[in-house]
Image: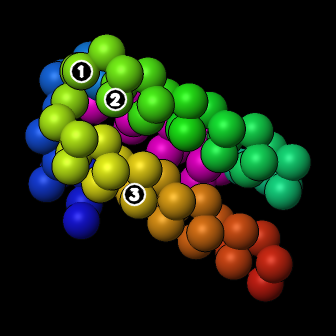
């Protein structure tokens, strides 16, 4: 699933985009670990406050996980 396929408020989409950019630009494993925690907490907050449907929160968590995995692979091969 892509970011455009996930239903979310515009303010949330803006923050998600910012986190994804930070993930793509991360320079090391520690930074990726920090961003993983940020993205997990962000998704938990969205789920707890009911800002998004549970399925969309799950899709967003998967999107963050995939982005972190891709960046981790890039860093390993650099």
Q: Which residue is mark 1?
A: 50
Query: Splitting the image into 4 quarters, where does residue 7 fall?
Result: top left
Q: Which residue is mark 3?
A: 63
Residue depicted at 58% across the width and 54% down the height: 24
Residue 22 is a magenta residue = yes
Which of the two labelled residues, at mark 3 and mark 2, occupies the earlier sequence position?
A: 2
Residue 47 is tagged as: 2
Calculate the distance from the C-alpha at mark 1 to the C-alpha at mark 2: 5 Å
Which of the two labelled residues, at mark 1 and mark 3, occupies the earlier sequence position?
A: 1
In the visual, does 1 lie left or right of 62? left
* Contact? badges 1 and 2 (CB < 8 Å): yes
Residue depicted at 46% across the width and 31% down the height: 44
Where is the N terminus found, in terms of image quarters? bottom left
Task: Using the image as rendered, state which of residue 75 and residue 46 is in the foreground.
Answer: 46
Name the spot of residue 13 as percent of width and height, x first. 28, 31
Name the spot of residue 55 as percent of width and height, x first. 20, 49
Query: Mark 1, mark 3: which one is toward the viewer?
Result: 1
Calculate the distance from the C-alpha at mark 3 to the C-alpha at mark 2: 15 Å
Q: Is residue 31 visible?
A: yes
Q: Is residue 14 visible?
A: no
In the visual, does 69 lie left or right of 6? right
Where is the C terminus found, in terms of image quarters? bottom right
């Amino acid at each position: 699933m892509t970011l455009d396929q996930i239903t979310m408020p515009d303010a949330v989409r803006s923050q998600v985009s910012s986190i994804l950019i930070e993930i793509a630009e991360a320079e090391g494993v520690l930074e990726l670990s920090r961003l993983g925690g940020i993205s997990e907490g962000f998704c938990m907050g969205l789920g707890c406050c009911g800002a998004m449907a549970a399925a969309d929160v799950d899709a967003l968590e998967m999107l963050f996980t995939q982005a972190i995995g891709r960046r981790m692979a890039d860093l390993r091969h650099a």
